[in-house]
Image (cartoon, grey):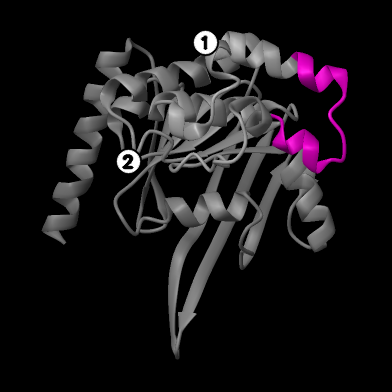
Amino acid sequence: MLYVKDLHKSYEVGKVRYEVLKGVDFHVAQGEFVAVMGPSGSGKTTLLNCISCYIPFDSGSITVGGSKLAGQSEDNLARIRNTKLGFVFQDFMLLDGLTIRENILIPRIIQGEVKPDGEELADKLTDLFGIGHILNKYPAEISGGEKQRAAVARSLINNPMILLADEPTGNLDSKSSRAVIETFIEARNKMSATVFMVTHDSFAASFCDRVILLKDGMIYRQLEKTGNQGEFQDQLLEVIREMSELEVSL
C-alpha cells in the first residue's frame, strides 16, 4: 500500500543546510492503522507532507498504491491527492457556508458532479460514524468531535487508498478524541480503510496496530500492539520516556 524507502529531506536556510529526514524506511499494509510519534523537530510533519505530495523530497522513494511520487507532474500529483489520498487535519477544514452533507461531498463536487453512488456513500459514512442527525446543520452548530467525524467521512468519500491524518485529535477533549479514533477504527473494520496518523498523543496512538517513533529524522523504534490498549499506551510512554532521557544525556 504505502512504501517509504531511504527517504531523505533537508531544508536550506541561508547557507546552512538542515537534514530533517535521514533515511526513513517503513511500509504500511492495506487495512492497517499506523501512527507516527516523536518529539518536536523529529521530522514527523515533514514526513507526512512528503507522503501527501505537498513538498518534494531529496532522495529515496515513496510509493502509494503502486504509484511512485518522485518525478510526477503537478497535474498527476493533484490527481493522486484527489483519488488515492484522503486527508484529515487538526482544524477540521470544513467550510462554514456549507452544510455538513455538502462538506462531506466536496471531493465529489471537485470532480465535477455528484452521482448517486456518491450520495449513497455519504449516507453510509454518516450512519457508520453516527452523524446522520447533523447532515443539514452547519459547522458552527456542531461540536468539535462531530466536526472531526464529518471530516473523516469527507476524507473517505472518494474511496482513497490511504487516509492521512495530521494531529486529528489535537483540538479535542478526551471524550471527543476517543470518538474520532473509534471512527478511524470503524473505517478500517467496515471499509478496509488504511490509516496513517501523525500524533503527539499516546492515548490516540495506543488504539493503533503499530506506532513508528521518530527521533532526529530517523526511526528510533517501531512498536506493534500485542496486548490491550492500556498496556500498549504504557509501553509507548515507557519508550517516549526512554527517548527523552537519551536526549537529556546527550
Q: Position of residue 231 (x, y in %)?
A: 25, 15
* As drawn, 226 above or below 43: above
| 221 to the left or right of 45 | left
Q: Quadrant of residue 241?
A: top left
Q: Position of residue 32 (x, y in %)?
A: 57, 23
Q: Secondary structure at mark 1?
A: loop
Image point (67%, 50%), residue name:
62
Mark 2: give few (<14), some (14-19) or many (20+) Cα within 10 Å.
Answer: some
Q: Magenta includes 119?
A: yes
The residue that label 1 is drawn on is 130
Q: Position of residue 182 (x, y in %)?
A: 45, 16
Identity, as a three-letter code, of the amino acid under mark 2:
His
At label 1, counting other C-alpha atoms closer than 10 Å, the crowd grade (few under 14, some 14-19, many 20 or more) is: some
Q: Amino acid at mark 1?
A: Gly
Task: Place residue 36 in its image quadrant.
Answer: top left
Q: Is residue 195 magenta?
A: no
Q: Quadrant of the C terminus?
A: bottom left
The answer for how far apart the CA atoms under marks 1 and 2 are is 26 Å
Q: Which residue is mark 2?
A: 200
Q: Which residues are magenta?
A: 105-120
On screen, residue 74 above or below 176: below
Give the mark nearer the N terminus: 1 vs 2: 1
Residue 208 in percent (x, y) is at: 43, 23
Q: Classify residue 165 as left or right of residue 109.
A: left
